[in-house]
Image (cartoon, helix red, strand yellow):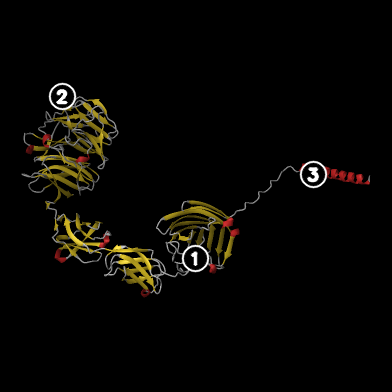
Amino acid sequence: MKTYLQKLLKTSGLLLLLLAVIPSCKKETTIKPIPPTPEVKTSSIKGKIDGKDFAIKESGITSTLYSTSGDGVKSLETAATLDADGSKLTFFIDDLKNGAIALSKKSGTSLNPGTRTIRINSTTPVQSYVYYYSSGNEYYAFSGSIEITVTDTDITIKWNIMFKDASGREFNSSGSFSITYASVVTKSKSEVKDPTPVADKPTIESITPNRGRAGDVVAIAGVNYSTTIADNIVKFNGVNAVVTSATATKLTVKAPTEGTTGAVTVKVKNSEVATGPVYSYIGAATFTSFAPASAKAGDIITITGTNFSETLADNIVHFSGAQNTVFTGTVTAATETQLKVTVPQGAVTGKIYLTVNSGLKLTSATDFTLTVPSQTNGWTQLELTVSPQAGIISASSGSKMFFSNGKTGKYLYYSSDKGVTFTNVFNSLPLTKDTLKVNYIVADGNYFYITTNLGVIKTDGTSFTKLTVSPNQPNLGFNGIVAKNDKIYLLLGTSNYVSLNGGATFQSYPMTLGGATRLDYITSDGNGKYFYAIDPTTNKFYKSTNQGQNWSATTGTTGNYFLGEGYKNILLSPTYTYAIFSTGTQLTGNRLYQSRGQGDVFVSVIDEQVNVVKQWGDYVAYGGESFSMSNDVGATYKHYTIPQGNVITGIERIENVFFIFCTAPGGQSIKIYKRTF
């Protein structure tokens, strides 16, 4: 009973205690959140090496932070065991701070793995490096970068680096690791050890160059060389070479005169002999010939021979100058048998001299002849000539120019360098060449448009595209064209073909000719309001005020247009309208006329033979027996004589350089002259 009461009292007491506590609990209205358990960071490393992924936890990582009191520079060494075979990756950061560092080959180490003793002590302080050990081979990263982030709790390293094996194969490693300070062992910086112990013999990693002539300087890279020059014995296929400089990792020597092709060896004091790559001897250079035999300054000639150096600077070419001087040509390309050389300013007719790798001076067997461009009345003749004599059609834009023979249209020359050089690109036109004929050329500032008897070509000078003017008649031929700001107008028969998108598509509109049989060689004023054309069957001059839809003959007196002779640059309409025609039946009667009334009244500009008129902005030029130029849209002109006996049949302009295409009595070809104004 007593026991029961005791139990009851205990039970009652507990109940009373609960009753006392419960009211107090009801008064508490806010539940306080339990703070989260702080995240515990651990060290880890994850990455890839030579194509193999790895992920290492803290137990497989050891890190040492080297720090000395009073020295603000700290170093970090972290090593990770990658697999059960003992492969290991070690990082040593010499100066631990935020930022990125670029790796280079570890000083004193060999790129050739597998020989753990072939290393030397490097100088203090130890440089940053990454070391990889696998299957008995040792590698040091020779390039790449390491990015370092340091916080109050941990250190994060990201890397992307390259190694090289004994065969020269390169392989990559990349990844990142995070090291907590809690997992780091701290030691004094005095305990930093360079992992490159003293070696027992020298190595040869490379020789540069590996081929050359006797006396050439050769660099030998490796380890364990003596800085005392006399301690290093170098031989080329058994013949002693003269050592000119020495460091612990590099020797420079001269290939011995008596040496022959074979292996290079190095011995340092009483060490074993290290055998390196083969050095191949090259025979003495020869100078066989050069071509062309004559050229002007700035031209390229080709020198032929043997045993030239493929390093441009090793080949020195001199041209004879006045009073026994010489001028150095610029070697622009080199093989063992050919040199491309630019003729220097100051060169004269005489011998060419060649020296290869400071060897013997070689002299050309024949004289080089310097061509001096002829200058007549201020005009310089270009070397290019074209046949036969006839009018020239041309167009220019920026530094580019096209021209062709206005009569035959059987060639098409192009220059991309302001008329310095020209190339015949006729065969580049995507049309059948047997019957192809170029009729006219214009430029709209972005592209050139070339009309032919088989279609219209659009080009930037590099690519050539045939425009689809009429899908049902793909080979329509045109003589004249107007091209302004991607708007293109072409006439044929009673149709006016118009493109408003640079020739991508065309629309055909009916056209009334106003009594003309046909209209060719159209042009327009600067705003495209007035169009002008010629009826070549009646020699009448026509105009249109609605972009070629309706035409009417002008009331101005005109005459014969010698279009069949190739003179097609005869219409022009900047501020004024110009036309070249003859009131007689002879080409020599051609005169230039100007109209200020859209062709209803023509007034003679000059009473002399004129064959071509061209305009570029404010510049207007015309020519025949002389050359005349205006820079105020034809208000005033300056007149210039041209090379004697010539007649201008074409004019073109690039920047401030004018080109004239000339014929001469009894001549068979067109000569080209240029002059800067």
Q: Quadrant of residue 565?
A: top left
Picture coordinates of residue 477, whole percent (x, y): 19, 31
Q: Is residue 612 left or right of residue 111?
A: left
User: Mark 1 or mark 2: which comes first in sequence?
Assistant: 1
Picture coordinates of residue 578, whole percent (x, y): 16, 36
Q: Which residue is mark 2?
A: 515
Which one is nearer the viewer's eye here, 268 or 299?
A: 268
Residue at 13%, 37% (x, y): give it.
408
Report, in whole angstroms, how far the alpha carbon at label 1 lies from the one at label 2: 100 Å
Which one is nearer the viewer's eye here, 276 or 584?
A: 276
Quarter holding the N terminus is top right
Which one is nearer the viewer's eye here, 507 or 423?
A: 423
Q: Which residue is mark 1?
A: 195
Report, in whole angstroms, how far the alpha carbon at label 1 lies from the one at label 3: 71 Å
Task: Tell me the amino acid under the disc marked 2.
Answer: Gly
Q: Quadrant of residue 475?
A: top left
The local crowd at label 1, few if under 14, some if 14 to 19, many if 20 or more residues have their Cα within 10 Å, is: few
Q: Is residue 207 left or right of residue 489?
A: right
User: Mark 3 or mark 2: which comes first in sequence?
Assistant: 3
Query: How many dots with numbers?
Result: 3
57 to 446, vertically: above or below? below
Mark 1 vs mark 2, foreground winner is: 1
Mark yes or no: residue 633 visible.
no
Mark 3 vs mark 2, foreground winner is: 3
Disc assigned to residue 24:
3
